[in-house]
Amino acid sequence: MAGSKPRRFRIVLGVTGSIACYKAVDLARYFIKRGANVRVVMTESATRFVSPLTFQSLTHNPVAQSFWTEGDSGSIGHIELADWAEAFVIAPATADSIAKLAMGSAESSLLATALATKAPIIIAPAMNSNMLSHPQTQENLTTLQGRGYEVVEPDSGLLACGWTGSGRLASNREIYVKTMRALGPADLLGKRVVISAGPTREMIDPVRYISNRSSGKMGLALANEAYRRGAVVTLIHGPMAGVASLSKDVTTVSVTSAAEMGEAIKTHAAGAQGAPRADVTIMAAAVADYRPVAERPQKIKKASFTPTIDLIENEDILKSLGMEHARRDGALLVGFAVETGTVEELLSEARSKLARKGADMIIANRAEDAFDKTTNQVWIVSGDTPPLHIETTSKKSIATAILDQVVARLRKRSGVELAH
Ligand code: CTP
C-alpha cells in the first residue's frame, strides 16, 4: 500500500571479541537502515574492542552483556532476548565462540541466548586463516551447520593479524541477504531457478555494437527474491551493473552476445551437457533480435564505411526453450514482453507471445514504465486466468508478485493445495 511502512523485523546481533567488532557497528546500521529493530548482546571480550554505548546509541536499545542484568519487566534477560528475536546474527563469531556454540555452552548471556532461541541463527566467523582452517574449527562449523545454523563464509584478503587468507568478516550485504533468506518463506526451497537479465551486445567491429536499453534491474530483483525464497539461483546476464550485490551463493554467468546467452541458458536451464534442468526459467533479458552477419576484425574507418550493416536474425531463446519445454514435466517457463503501444495492444501482444513461444507466463510491461526506472507496472499474462495487473511499485515488489505467481503455479502443478 502506498505510504505504508513495512513491519520492522527483529534482529538480535551477537558480538563476540574479535578485532572485526568495529565492523559489527556498521552491520547494525546496515540492518537498521533496511527496517530492522536491532538489539545487541555482547560478550565481555567484545566490550574491550567496542563500547556497548556505541551500539546502544545506534540501535536505541539497551545492550545485553551480563546474566546479572535484569530483563524487561523483571523477566530473565537472555530468555526474553531469545524469545524476542526473529533472527539471531552472531557477527563477528570468534573461534572460541564457535567452539562454545558447538558444545552447547551457556557460559555467557550471548551463548545462553543462542541456546534458548527458536529463531534462525546466522553466524559470520572472523579470525586468523589458520584458526579458521584448523580441523577443530571446521568440525565445529560443520556441527553447527548440521544443527541448522547458517554460516556466512568469511572473505579472503589481508587479515588484522598480518596474514593474508580466508578469515575476514563477510560483507554486510552477504550477512544481510543470508539473514533475509533465513527469515524468508522458503517456498522455493531447493528449486532450481534460472534467470536471464540485462541486454546483449552484438559486435559490429571491436569498438561498436548493437544493443538495447535494459539496465537488468528487473532480472536482478528476481534473482534476489528467488534466493530469499530459498531457490538455487543462476543468473545469466549481459553487460550490466549490480551483479556483485547478489549473494555469493547465486551462480552468475556473464555473457555478451545473444548466441552466448543462448548457449549458457541451454546448459543451465535446459540441462545440456548433463547439467540439471531448471524448475523455473525466467527470460527477463532483452535479447537482441538481430546481429551483424559478421563482426569486422578491425575498426571500420569512416572513410571506408558504407552506411549499411547486414543483419541476421538471432535464435529466439525463449521460443527454443518453449518448444522443448512442452516435453518436460512440471517445469515453468516465464517470458517478458515490452511494448510501446496501449495497454490493450500490450496484452494482445503478450497473449500472442505466450502462444507463439510456448511460455507459461508472460510479464507484459511498457517501455515508458520500465526503462531507466527503479519502479515498473506489469500485467502477468497466462493462458488460464485473466491478466493480473501489478500497479506501479518497486522492481523488488514486482519480483515478489511474479514469484508469488510462480510458486502458486508450481504448487498447482504438483497438486498441493494453495495456502491462500
Ligand atoms: N527473447 C529471447 N530471444 C530473443 C528475443 C527475445 O529469448 N532472440 C525473449 C525475451 O527474453 C523475452 C521475450 O522473448 O522474454 C520477448 O521478447 P520481445 O523482444 O518482446 O519479443 P520478440 O519475440 O522479439 O517480438 P517483437 O520484437 O516483435 O515484439
Image (cartoon, grey):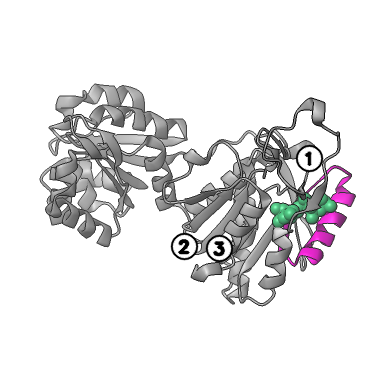
- Compared with residue 101, is residue 171 higher up or lower down, i.e. above or below? above
Answer whether labels 3 and 2 touch (C-beta < 8 Å). no
Viewer-side label of 3, 1: 3
Residue bearing mark 1:
367
- Name the amino acid type tagged 1: Ala
- Which secondary structure lies at badge 2? loop
Spatial distance from mark 3 to mark 1, Cα to Cα?
A: 30 Å
Q: In the displayed orientation, state which residue is furthest to the left.
A: 107
Query: Within 10 angstroms of label 3, few (less than 14), some, or many (20 or more) residues?
Result: some
Q: Is residue 379 left or right of residue 227?
A: right
Q: Is residue 279 left or right of residue 208?
A: left
Answer whether labels 3 and 1 touch (C-beta < 8 Å). no
Question: Which of the labelled discs sits on residue 189, or is there none?
Answer: 2
- Name the amino acid type tagged 2: Leu
Viewer-side label of 1, 2: 1
Residue at the location (76% across, 64% down)? 357
- Which secondary structure lies at badge 3? helix
User: Which one is in front, 125 or 255?
Assistant: 255
